[in-house]
Image (tube, rainbow, N blue to C red):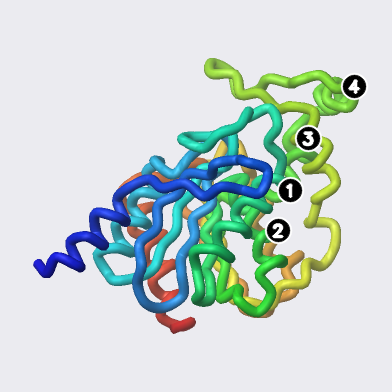
Amino acid sequence: MPFSYAAAICLAMETRFHRMTDGRRIAFRHTAGSGPAIVFLPGYMSDMTGTKATALFDWAAANGRECLLLDYSGCGESSGDFAEGTLSRWAEEVTALVEKRVSRPVILVGSSMGGWLMLLVGRSLGPRLAGLVGIASAPDFTDWGYNEAQKAKLGRGETVFTYGYDPTPTHPGFWADGQAQRLLAGKFALDCPVRLLHGQDDADVPPEISLRLASAVRSQDVQVTLVKGGDHRLSRDGDIALILRTVAALAESAS
């Protein structure tokens, strides 16, 4: 193996940091390659070490495709307080990293909350956006994901904890920002190819949300795939294979 190639592989495996103008240090991994750059956006309280992110990065590196992973501020190896995180803040971080590290067109792959974030980031990328792949996308979950009592608490500035045995906090700042970023009620002006994958047994995000998203996006090139027996994570071997096939086909058509 030539030294230069070995060095590039080692660099891709390392976690590096991008400094935002206010000092936030955003952890990322990046591998160079051909075709549109694939950027993975994790879900709420997730990071770039997850099963789907790792599988996508490894696939991209093995196939000579450019790929970018990152941890939002307050998550994983990035600096910051999770309680200060919002969709707007995290979208700013993703956009800054793409502008700094990626020169090619971009395919955004968003998991759960990342499927909401990819829409916001995609809008900011304009003509550079080559496609979207949503995995159990959860746009507008600050609206449909909470009951009226929980919304009232959040509206009063209180933190709400959900999801049973391992309570997950929703902070009032995130909720208020999310309510201001809702997309499903209107027509969302994106015209790139969109692929939406959703498990039929998803107990956290109803498959109906992906169908609503398909209707809300202006693009006419939208496909929804429902996975029988699939849960919210879509991390079984067959699920991962489906994700990789979907991304590969979209990347090939955009190359």
What is the crowding at mark 3: few (fewer than 14 residues within 10 Å), some, or many (at least 20)?
many
- According to the image, label 1 marks what residue? 88
- On the image, which quarter does residue 44 sit in? top right
Query: Mark 1 against mark 2, which lies toward the viewer?
Result: 1
Compared with residue 129, is residue 136 higher up or lower down, i.e. above or below? above
On-image quarter of the N terminus: bottom left
- Say which of marks 3 and 1 sits in front: 1
**Residue 47, above or below 119:** above
Residue 156's tag is 4
**Tags 2 and 4 touching, CB below 8 Å:** no
Q: Residues within 10 Å of mark 4 (few under 14, many from 20)?
A: few
Residue 210 appears in the figure: yes
Residue type (three-letter) at the residue carrying disc 2: Leu
Q: Residue sitting at 29 percent across and 51 percent down?
A: 13
Measure the alpha-carbon separation of dots 4 and 1.
21 Å
**Marks 4/3: CA distance?**
11 Å
Looking at the figure, which quarter contains the C terminus?
bottom left
**3D distance between C-alphas at marks 1 and 2:** 8 Å
Which residue in the structure is indicated by mark 2?
120
Q: Is residue 208 visible?
A: no
Label 1 or label 2, whichever comes before in sequence order: 1
> Is the Cβ of the residue at disc 1 closer than 8 Å to that at disc 2?
yes
Residue that extends furthest to the top in the rendered view of this protein? 165
Instruction: List x then y, in percent, for residue 155.
Output: 89, 27
Q: Name the secondary structure under disc 1.
A: helix
Q: Nearer the viewer, mark 4 or mark 1?
A: 1
Q: At label 1, which amino acid type do we have?
A: Ser
Of labels 3 and 2, earlier in sequence is 2
Q: Identify the secondary structure beneath mark 2.
A: helix
Q: Residue at label 3?
A: 175
Give the mark nearer the N terminus: 4 vs 3. 4
Which element is circle 3 on?
A: helix
